Amino acid sequence: MDYKQAGVDIEEGYRAVGKYREHSKMTLNDAVLNGIGSFAGMYSLGEFFRGAGMLEDPVLVSSTDGVGTKLDIAFRMKKYGTVGIDCVAMCVNDVICHGARPLFFLDYLACDKLDANVAAEIVKGVAIGCQETGSVLLGGETAEMPGFYEAGKYDIAGFSVGIADRKKIVDGTKIREGDILVGIASSGPHSNGYSLIRKVLPNLDEDFEGVPIGMALLEPTRLYARPVLGLMERIDVRGMAHITGGGFYENIPRMFPAGEKKLAAAIREWSWTVPPIFSRIAAGCYNPGCSGPMAQKLGASMLNLNDDLKKQMFSVFNMGIGFVLAIAPDEARTAVEYLESMGFSAWEIGYVEKAAGQGAEKQELRFV
């Protein structure tokens, strides 16, 4: 028996790496000292500083994440390109929460049996995400593990490294009572809550506004790096939150200073446009047997009438807001107008107030 008979096709791996190399080229810059295929990627900070200007006290900022069970929908729909974008977004959107500029990204792709075309389509999405966020796709790993993963399924994860000047790091310490919370539109569920979505929306071929709902669920996570970093050059952004798993309740309070939390978020209910996919998901949570246009209407109604359902939805999903910023009241309108000019819908969705209660009873977010 040889390695191929054991389930690992070395030649297919070589073919995949060749395709990766082509996709990575679109992300390279002068700071990259080698290419895909080396044992490790090398990125020259000297070249970066010459191009971007010297930072007084440079700090590296990093984040790692994956795509989760959204991958199951991608493989059932045989659409592979968007999950690579998701992987980049989930990492880079976290890095920029602290005001860091993304430098480079690495990915990890694992499967039962490698198909170079499928793997390359996934990595192409990674390269697109890197290009849109100003990141270099510096390298990665493809692991073929026969008998470990389900046949035909892949997993992808990655990590992003960015850089910030210590004096410009955004850590929430500048947030004040009365600051305005500006929300930036999401493109849908992004990459969170799909274990629930797959239970309540089992039929991916169901018609949803003219397309199979499975395709709507694969809308990639929005990449907020360019508009957010551009906004930071214009105004003082005091805090930021990427709305991922845990929805509003878990993520918005994370922008406040660590330790004794004396501030809280007050969210103006329905002060933004909620994408219709969330009404359809809500209907599935409330009545798993419903489907079609009537289900969407039911979900929209129940989000207004059923407080338990509404709390669950805001505890799991972004509900149409993928990124939140804390802005001084006199600069909030400027922030919204700039984000809109960059093609990102944005709204003043609430404000910062003193936290009510003490200890375990402390309320860090409420709807008004």
Image (cartoon, rainbow, N blue to C red):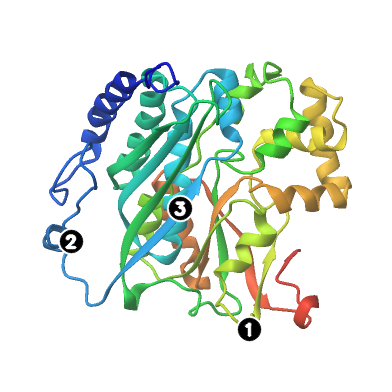
Vertical placement of 194 versus 40: above or below?
Answer: above
Residue 230 visible to an observer of this rendering: no
Going by the numbered disc 1, the residue's amino acid type is Glu
Vertical placement of 356 versus 49: above or below?
Answer: below
Residue 149 visible to an observer of this rendering: yes
Viewer-nearest of labels 2 and 1? 2
Q: Are marks 3 and 2 in contact (CB under 8 Å)?
A: no
Instruction: Kindly report the distance in space between the C-alpha atoms of the residues bearing marks 2 and 1.
Output: 36 Å
Residue neighbourhood size for the residue with mark 3, other residues' Cα within 10 Å, grouped as few (<14), some (14–19), many (≥20): some
Residue 310: horizontal and vertical position, in percent? Answer: 80, 49
Q: Quadrant of the C terminus?
A: bottom right
Q: Secondary structure at mark 2?
A: helix
Q: Quadrant of the N terminus?
A: top left
The residue that label 3 is drawn on is: 64
Instruction: Kindly report the distance in space between the C-alpha atoms of the residues bearing marks 1 and 3.
Output: 26 Å
Instruction: Specify the farthest residue to the front.
Output: 1
Counting residues from the start of the chain, the first of labels 3 and 2 encountered is: 2
Q: Secondary structure at mark 3?
A: strand
Q: Nearer the viewer, residue 193 or 172?
A: 193
Residue 100: horizontal and vertical position, in percent? Answer: 35, 62
Q: Which mark is residue 45?
A: 2
Q: Which mark is residue 360?
A: none
